[in-house]
Amino acid sequence: AGTAVETGVTAPALAEARRQLATMQSAPPTDEELTEARDYLCGTFPLRFGTATPVASMAAALTVLGLSPDEPDHFRERVAAVDRAAIAQIADELAASAEKIIIVGDAAAITGPLEAEGFTVQVEADSAAPA
């Protein structure tokens, strides 16, 4: 999973993601919520490819992940097959893998707020990064 947020909201956004994940583990979405989410994802998926940039990004992602070029052709059928049990299983898997979260940004601005939200922070500076 991944996201992009402004530096100032990194900690609260990550804390909210953690809360939402915990909620999904203990109380998966209702059938109505799941239907709404599936309909939205399936309905808006083609809109993501309105220009060459997202098409190229998808092609690059498929290559990096070692997936078949026709993977996007099956997206909607796979989303339509997701049920409440799958949501709970995925939430458990994500929670287990969330022990390490990689954040790229201004460490001086992000570290304090992350620690205030209860995250343990380990900063690894890239020597190639601009000063």
Image: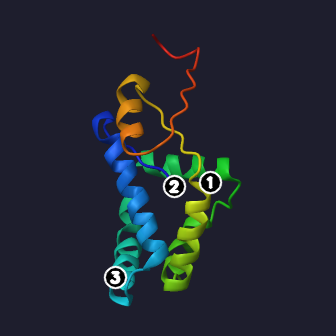
Q: Secondary structure at mark 3?
A: helix
Identity of the residue furthest to the left in this view: 8
Q: What amino acid is labelled 1 in the image?
A: Leu
The residue identified by callout 2 is 1
Identity of the residue furthest to the top in this view: 131
> Which x, y percent locates residue 23?
41, 71
- Separation of residues labelled 2 and 1 (CA atoms): 15 Å
Identity of the residue furthest to the right in this view: 66
- Separation of residues labelled 3 and 1 (CA atoms): 29 Å
**Structural crowding at the residue carrying mark 2, measured as other residues with C-alpha within 10 Å and reported as few (<14), some (14–19) or many (≥20):** few
Q: What amino acid is labelled 2 in the image?
A: Ala
**Which of marks 1 and 2 precedes in the sequence?**
2
Residue 50 visible in the picture: no
Residue 62: image tag: 1
Where 113 falls versus 46 (above or below)? above
**Which of marks 3 and 2 precedes in the sequence?**
2
The residue identified by callout 3 is 33
Q: Name the mark nearer the viewer: 2 or 1.
A: 2
Callout 2 touching callout 1 (CB < 8 Å)? no
Where 50 falls versus 114 (above or below)? below
> Which x, y percent locates residue 61?
58, 50
Q: Secondary structure at mark 1?
A: helix
Q: Secondary structure at mark 2?
A: loop
**Which of marks 1 and 3 precedes in the sequence?**
3
Side of 90 relative to 118 (left or right): right
